[in-house]
Every structure is written in C-alpha cells, then in structure tokens.
Amino acid sequence: DAEITQSPRHKITETGRQVTLACHQTWNHNNMFWYRQDLGHGLRLIHYSYGVQDTNKGEVSDGYSVSRSNTEDLPLTLESAASSQTSVYFCASSEGTSGTTDTQYFGPGTRLTVL
Amino acid sequence: AQKVTQAQTEISVVEKEDVTLDCVYETRDTTYYLFWYKQPPSGELVFLIRRNSFDEQNEISGRYSWNFQKSTSSFNFTITASQVVDSAVYFCALSEEAAGNKLTFGGGTRVLVKP
C-alpha cells in the first residue's frame, strides 16, 4: 500500500548540531509539506514543495531548509539546532499539481528534542 | 490572511453524550477549503473531511456530522453518542485557493470522553 513515512520517529540532539529529518511518500504526490506542532499553536507550516526542484518557505521557516531532488522525498534540515526547535514534526503530501487544493495526508511524526 | 480559531481548548463529556466542536475561520478568498483532522493519543493525524466553499450542504458520516455556515464563517463538527475511542485532539484547517495547497490550522480542541 502507498504510504508516507518519517524517520527517525524520535531524535535527541544537542544545541548547534545539524539534524536532518526524512520524509518519504510512495503515492507519487507532487506536493509535500513540513509542519511543526507545538502546544497551543496547532500545526504551523515550515516549508513546502510543489514538485521536484521546487521549494518554498512557510510561516516558520527560519533555521530550517529543504530540498526536493525527487518526487518521493522531502528531507528537512535544521542547520544549527536550537532548543526552540524542540517540537513534533509532521510531513504531509497531497496529489495536486501547481499547488491545487487536495487533501493532505500526514506521516506519523518525528519527535525532536534539542538539549 | 487566513486564520482559524478553535475557541474550545478542551471538552470533557461522558460516554454517549453528544459533543460539538466549534471552528471559526477568516479568509478574503471566495474559493477555499475547510478540513477536519483527528489526532488520537497515538499521535498520527487522521483526515476526516474536506469541504469547499461552494458546498454548504451539511454532511453526516456515521456518528460524525459537520455544519458549514458561510454566513457565520463556521464549520462545526458534532460527534453524536460519543465513545471512549473518540478521545483525541481535533483540528480544523483552512486552505485558500489563492494561497495554493497550504493549510492553516486552528489550535485544536482536546476531547476527553469518559466511560
């Protein structure tokens, strides 16, 4: 069955280290997204991509980067992890083309702790 | 800018009671989409419903029903005869067509169903 996976599911790192969270989907969806979930804030958009080689900044993009070299993967990199980036990170994908509004389906999440 | 407000942060009910979750949204776009997602204690995000701005017909799916009223910018969600398995955090989200496929989430409402 097609799915969307995230790895690792849990990660503990230290302040200042570079961290990469993986997101892989097998639906062949064009659109992929990264959100973070923090208590009291719901989910907030970090970065998103409408296709290969396309990346865009979301609401809370500072300190994060993404790259899209193929359809299936959108890794999220924290260049220099900060304690404020302790959060649960969700990846999502949707079918669309050029950002049309389709339903987003979410991965299981990655819990990141920055000490 | 789009905004979603879920004023109820937590609702506690006894099993078999009905519970209604409020969602109020703000948008300047005439074409937009509204969503509800469920996040059970296991943490994943489960898609429940997607509605476009031109379809105000209420929808029922089993014990779940949704009331969309453009006049009050609301998209409320009712669980009838609640069960313990309904205990979760429920998120309302909005996507404006002009803004592509990006979702703006409300802060979520935690529903606790007691046996």
Image (tube, rainbow, N blue to C red):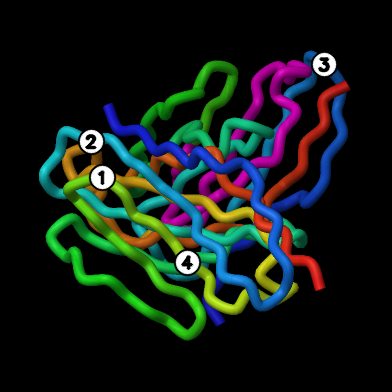
Mark in front: 3 vs 4:
4
Secondary element at image label 4: strand
* Quadrant assignment for the N terminus of chain B: top left
Residue annotated with mark 3 = A15
Task: Evaluate whether label 2 is on the same chain as label 4.
Answer: yes
Task: Evaluate whether label 2 is on the same chain as label 1.
Answer: yes
Secondary element at image label 3: loop
Kindly identify which chain the residue marked by label 3 belongs to: A
Residue type at numbered disc 2: Thr
| Residue count near mark 3 (Cα–Cα under 10 Å), binned few <14, some 14–19, many ≥20 | some
Q: Position of residue A2 (x, y in %)?
A: 52, 76
Q: A37 or A72, which lies in front?
A: A37
Measure how far apart labels 3 and 1 are at the Cα level: 43 Å
Q: Choose the circle earlier in sequence order: 2 or 4.
A: 2
Q: Choose the circle earlier in sequence order: 2 or 1.
A: 2
Q: Which mark is residue B27?
A: 2
Residue annotated with mark 4 = B78
Which region is colored magenta?
Answer: A67-93
